[in-house]
Image (tube, rainbow, N blue to C red):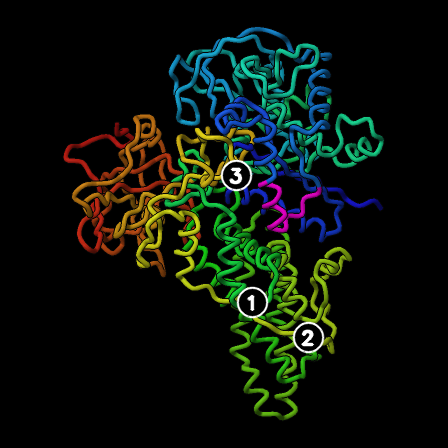
Amino acid sequence: MPEKKFYLTTPIYYVNARPHIGHAYSTIAADVIARRHRLLGDDTFFLTGTDEHGQKVERSAAAAGIPPLQFADQVSATFRALWDRMGITYDDYIRTTEPRHIEAVQKLFQLLLDRDKIFLSSYTGQYSIGEEMFVDGPPGTIGPDGKPTETITEENYFFRLSEYQLPLIDLIESEDPENRLLIQPESSRNEVLSFLRGNVAEATDRGEVLELSALGKAYVPGALKDLSISRTSFKWGIPVPGNEKHVIYVWLDALINYLTGIGYGSDNPADQERFNRYWPADLHLVGKEITRFHCVYWPAVLLAAGIPTPKSVVANGWLLFDDSKMSKSKGNVVRTETILDAFGTEVYKKQFPDSTKKEQDLFGADVLRYFLLREIPFGQDGSFSFDAMITRYNADLANGYGNLVSRTLSMIEKYFGGLIPEGTVDPELGQRLEASVVLGSQNFHAYGFSNLLEILMASIKAIDGYITFHAPWKQAAVGDEKSNADLRDTLHTAFESIRILTVLLYPILPCVTAKVWAQLGLGDIEQAAKSGELNNLEWGGLKPGTKLGALAPIFPRADKGLAQVMIDMENPTSTPQKPEHPKPSKFVDETTTHTSAAPTDPTDPAAAPRTSSLAEPAPGMTVGGSYAISTERPGTPSHTEARASGVFANSAARSDIPDTPQIVIDDFVKIDLRVAQIIVAERIPKADKLLRLEVDLGYEKRQILSGIAEWYTPEELLGKKIVVIANLAPRKMRGLESHGMLLAASHGDDGKPVLATFAEDIPVGSRLK
């Protein structure tokens, strides 16, 4: 029976500046998925790369004083070098400036022309340079990147996207797994379907005739418009075949990489065989802001070309720093290299001074992999901070997994001379681990990495509790026949549990689990994965008498001062912060342009004086999700803490002159402030600071968790009209969803919140402007 194939891709990253942890987030997730499928024996192909055309790259290269290709060469090289440094196991790295890609793009464009799916016309509209796209609105409209658009009139080729409204709706709504585009999470799927269906409510109010999809869902015919797919106002792109004054729109050019990477467009029989083997893609991993490109435009182009559509698209959320989206244009991104250097040299090298640079880098990469996938439910937005990463590392890895391995193997070494004892597995613990295996597999399949790691950490605590309860040191001290048998059973059970947990952790912690596997005396974990040995997750897979490998610490403990080390790495020219306030006021700008001669690396912030930032990346070509700014001041509670408690507090009272950054009106109107009435208020068991509130917004009822239990009783809140941020994305706390945030002022040393209320009666649902 032939191997099952699995083809997955990351978004290809736009080369306007160096990579940061947002790019690493998607790439890490893809690597975990690829490792898992290889472990299962699937014929896996993992593609990543860089998108290198478009007006933004052309302008950035001009600002750096070098040709666009040289600019793209240098930035693309930094991405590839970082993935190699992190041990990312991609099978191909595609660049859109490669001849094979140019050939593939022109071939597909010509195919669409031949099928009359493209036509030539002219268009005048508002163009967002930062997002490389036309947007609706009058001159001066603010684009998705927050900057004014430019009015552009030009001759364009247009793709007949309007023909695919119903086919796309049916494709996404289909209940047939073999003939469906699966979009995850559900919020992204709903957003795409809403775009495709048009504004059904408004059309109904106007009395327009609606049509129904195959599943009987209403949509507005004609809501999907034809789409411009070429440009003539710049030259840095792939020429339209037969009409070279046009270059193919960067988003279409970039999307075709998924075909190019497995051989599309090539005349080589081996390439053609590879394409037929791996297409359609089983999984496109994307940032949530580019789902429309991947779930509307891309499948429509493939349908028009007669090429099968991908099987699934999974969108990850954004990484937030202090509740703000990290942004290269703001100059406040967090570089992956900072984390690799800090954990590799400041933690690992100090414990293992003879370790190689490669070992140090892979250890640092494992720490980042674990933190991002444990801390952030995949598909949702999540917060990043150096302090949180250090806390999670110490609690889960150093004190959890690492300590369990160390104490168990040390006792086997002490009491059995390093030979795995024969024994009987504890049935209760065995049952729990078997359930963890089942749940672990389910969560891997559903990309529920955070849930998976929560389950595994709970299992580690259970095994630790099992060891503490049976006290093998006491069993060994008694020394009679029964105690010796109990000792063998205890340590056999603990060892077998560690073996199974290590297999489940391997795709997420490949470097660290390799060290554990060797200490377990089981050899090379990479070879075990290739041979199928890691598929054995049943009790009894352990061979008694196996000799342990050389024992050594796995996770050296990280000092809290490491946060300041990373801050200094990010902002080497800043004044050091006091230890009690470790976060910087701002990260160094690393997306600079220059007025002097071009440096060796045009994206190096130290290479020349800063004059202005490069434009932000195009939506189809970067992982949204790692944009951040910190406006925290000494003594000010972090926005992350405020959000976690469900309260947004005004902390300006802590300073006579607030130093918050200025915003424009467009920033303010994004916040939907509404009048809400509290209809339920109750305490949450084992959560002293949290209250569970249900609020009436007029148009719907919401649950909000709020950290005000120290200052308000549930009884005094009932019936109170308050102000909430209504368009804040929901998040989970204590296993409960919190959807919204209360508005409050904060005063005094204890930061007591005072809820914003109203002196006059006002209907619920009213919007504050």
Counting residues from the start of the chain, the first of labels 3 and 2 encountered is: 3
Q: Secondary structure at mark 2?
A: loop
Check residue 139 for magenta coloring. Answer: no
Which numbered dot is residue 353?
1
Looking at the picture, how far across and down is residue 663, in whole percent?
30, 31
Looking at the picture, how far across and down is residue 302, in whole percent?
68, 23
Q: CA distance from mark 3 to mark 2?
A: 43 Å
- Give the residue type at disc 1: Pro
Foreground of the two, 559 or 356: 356
Q: Give the extent of the magenta segment.
A: 78-91
Q: Which residue is mark 2?
A: 548
Check residue 82 for magenta coloring. Answer: yes
Q: Which residue is mark 3?
A: 18
Which numbered dot is residue 149?
none
> In the visual, does 448 lie left or right of 726?
right
Q: Quadrant of residue 159?
A: top right
- Give the residue type at disc 3: Arg
Identified at 26% across, 30% down, the residue is 768
> In the visual, does 502 lie left or right of 6?
left
> In the visual, does 737 lie left or right of 413?
left
Identified at 60% across, 30% down, the residue is 70
Q: Secondary structure at mark 1?
A: loop
Q: Secondary structure at mark 3?
A: loop
Vertical order, 295 against 90 (above or below): above
Answer few, some or many: residues within 10 Å of disc 1's Cα (few below 14, many 20 plus, some between 14 and 19): few
Counting residues from the start of the chain, the first of labels 2 and 1 encountered is: 1
